[in-house]
Amino acid sequence: MSHELMREARELLDKSLLYYQGRPVGTVAANDPDMEALNYDQCFVRDFVVSAIAFLTEGQFEIVRDFLLVTLHLQSHEKQMDGFSPGPGLMPASFKVEHIDGEERLVADFGEHAIARVPPVDCCLWWILILRAYAKATGDWALAHQADFQEGIKLILDLCLVHRFAMYPTMLVPDGAFMIDRRMGVYGHPLEIQVLFYAALRAAKELLLPDNNGDEYLEAVKHRLGTLGYHVREYYWLNLQRLNEIYRFSGDEFGQEVANKFNIYADSIPPWLTEWLPENGGYLAGNLGPGWMDFRFFALGNLMAILISLASEEEAQQIMNLIEACWHDLVGYMPMKICFPAVEGADWRIITGCDPKNRPWSYHNGGNWPILLWMLTAAAIKTNRQEIAQKAIAVAEERLGKDCWPEYYDGKNGRLIGKESRRYQTWSIAGYLAAKDLLANPANLNLISFDENPEFIPS
């Protein structure tokens, strides 16, 4: 069954290719014949990440190269004058090919047509990671060293390293600015963006040349890596020991040397957490801000933190221990749940704005997403816990093909195909292929992973 499923997935991925001037430049989001396309017929930058991994591990390098060239061309260069247009450095959320008067044109969407009109904070970060993965897979570092690519990286860094009203090295972003692209109470400093920010800085450090003021950017990158890495490990990490420390915090402390820097109150610790967290497990909290910690488990941020060594080796093992111990909650019948637990009742009304698509245990609010299979597999390989990857892939293989490769699943354990889920979702297909390819050839993990950062602790 596995070989047949692989062959089907590969054929479907090839069918998803988006062509421009006769060359494949990306993959459409989905090819569901029974649902209105909306923007699912476009190529999303964040969606293409896993397609790129699947192509690179199979030696299909030109598709990824052409995607990088096209998206660099679409990058915004205009200074924002009216407050309604994208600022310089921003990468589009998606793009499509239109035929106008017999000519093909690339049309980018920077959030102008998105639900709630939120710009994509994550896309420029993912773009740098795709560029690094391409260079590592092909040895073609010359592409990244071209002047236009160097300028593109610097524009992204200008966007991310700008002076702001902040006392911490994390990046402030609104709700709906990344994979969780609807209101889910992640405004502030969500883990996923901090991890992607850290990864993009690591990649930029490898890709940037020191000439043409590149040395100034490299110095800024080096400094932010140290402070950001320290901040996330020091303040986002949660295990039973840390939970006990938070429980005994004093509140309303003033001064430089205080333990409770964010003024977190013990009563904010949710009752479910003390019962759910295993003795040998831990994870990075979902968000952190003044007087508030989001104790929800967010899968992408935690798995990515393992891959890029933002989580220490000990913390990485504890995250995998948590996934193994809470398998029924976090993996269930389809790897894996995007966040846990779901917000329900009055919390759902307030946090999501009564969003019917994000009803409890659906979509972003505790739904199960097959796309996360590849990242779970990669994290399992990185921590030498391949048995977790094998088990998760076996679970996915039971249903993905039969269910026509859905976008997401619903229910506390992912037993229901998502109520509004597209079928033949490209990143579900590519996620399965990437997971299988990584498990078959673990050396490919170096396309997307990083070793410990030598400049981790700030001086």
Image: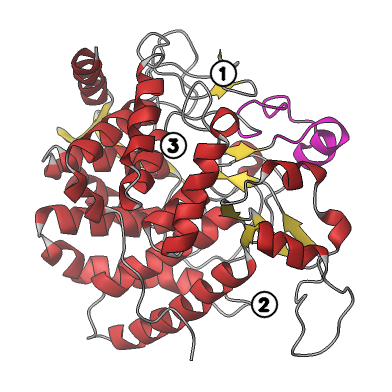
| Residue 179 seen in the figure | no
Image-based side of 116 in relation to 404, left or right: right
Where is mark 2, residue-wise? 166
Camera-near label (3 vs 1) is 3
| In the foreground, 358 or 71 | 358
CA neighbours of label 3 inside 10 A, class few (<14), some (14 to 19), many (20+): many
Contact between marks 3 and 1 (CB within 8 A): the answer is no
Look at the image and say whether residue 299 sits in the magenta stretch: no
| In the foreground, 317 or 107 | 317
The kind of residue tagged 3 is: Leu
CA neighbours of label 1 inside 10 A, class few (<14), some (14 to 19), many (20+): many
> Distance between the Cα atoms at labels 3 and 1?
15 Å
Of the image marks 2 and 1, the number of the one nearer the N terminus = 2
Where is mark 1, residue-wise? 418
Residue located at (57% from left, 53% from top): 283
Camera-near label (2 vs 1) is 1
The kind of residue tagged 2 is: Ala
Look at the image and say whether residue 346 sits in the magenta stretch: yes
Image-based side of 84 in relation to 425, left or right: right
Where is mark 3, residue-wise? 372
Residue range highlighted in magenta = 342-365
Q: Quadrant of residue 451?
A: bottom left
Please, which residue is most extreme toward the front here?
279
Contact between marks 2 and 1 (CB within 8 A): the answer is no
Image-based side of 346 in relation to 208, left or right: right
Query: Horizontal and vertical percent for residue 29?
Result: 39, 29
Residue located at (32% from left, 70% from top): 204
